[in-house]
Amino acid sequence: MKDIIFYPAGDCALVAEFGREIDEEINNKVHALAQWITARRIRGVREVLPTFRSLMVTYDPCRISYKRLTNILSKCTFESHSDDTAQKQIIEVPCCYDGPDMEDMTTLTGLSREEIIAIHSGTDYKIYMMGFLPGFVYLGGLDPRICAPRLSTPRTRIEPGSVGIGGSQTGVYPVASPGGWRILGYTPLKFYDPLKDEPILCRAGQYIRFVPISRDEYEKAVAK
């Protein structure tokens, strides 16, 4: 692939970079390469870790060398395409839009609360990558009408399940954490549960669809 640049990342990993922008087509290529590698079970490859615009591949240097692995990957062929509705793996995330920053959001955007909710819940957001916290999703596709700057003074604690906006991104805080994103609401879903066999709710490449719920529905779901 001519559009991939390879870099060593220590003595047991490499990075395959497709570009320098946050772009859906670039991210599609990242996930397509990850799937290509996984499907071929390349000897010595341990794990693939997608980011916005690159893929980290960890490997056992006793079983495959950096040169050998880059040789294999440079000759790979795969199709990169945008997912249509039939191909999307969509996780529906109930959200009670009753967050502390909703009033500020109406002032910043010039939109009503109802308009902000309709816009935020009207998009299927692709999970570009995971990071920052266990189970934290970096989502693409936020409507520019509801983009908003981070708080000038971050909060020292944001509760698990908080749904927020930071700049041109939206996401869900999986655990309690300091943070500067503007909180629109809360979901009863646990994006990280260390007691489960699969502690992380979702993975990169899937989609999230926010579904508005009432405060009563939220409290009933939390109480279960």
Image (spheres, rainbow, N blue to C red):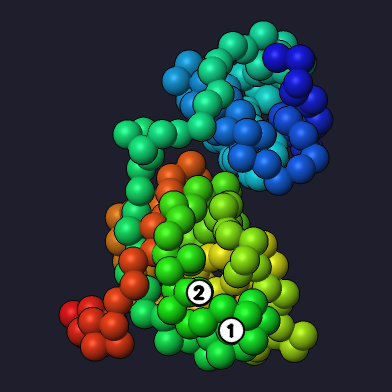
- Residue at which label 1 appears: 106
Above or below — where is 20 with respect to 152? Answer: above
Q: What is the quadrant of residue 187 in the picture?
A: bottom left
Element class at badge 1:
helix
Mark 2 is surrounded, within 10 Å at the Cα level, by few (under 14), some (14 to 19) or many (20 or more) other residues, namely many
- Amino acid under label 1? Thr
The residue sitting at 48% across, 61% down in the picture is 135
Q: Which residue is mark 2?
A: 116
Q: Quadrant of residue 194?
A: bottom left
Residue 55 screen position, x and y as percent = 65, 35
Q: Residues within 10 Å of mark 1 (few under 14, many from 20)?
A: some
Residue 104, position as x, y percentages in the image = 62, 88
CB-based contact (under 8 Å), mark 2 and mark 1: yes
Q: Residue at x 34, y 72 (%)?
A: 212
Q: Is residue 82 left or right of residue 219?
A: right
Decide which of 93, 64 is in the foreground and name it.
93
Amino acid type assigned to the residue bearing label 2 in the image:
Ile
* Label whose residue precedes the other's in the sequence (2 or 1): 1
- Out of 32 and 96, give the one closest to the viewer: 96
Residue at figure coordinates x 75%, y 88% from the top left: 153
**Residue drawn at point x = 78 percent, y = 26 percent:** 6
Give residue 169's position: percent from left, percent from top.
62, 62
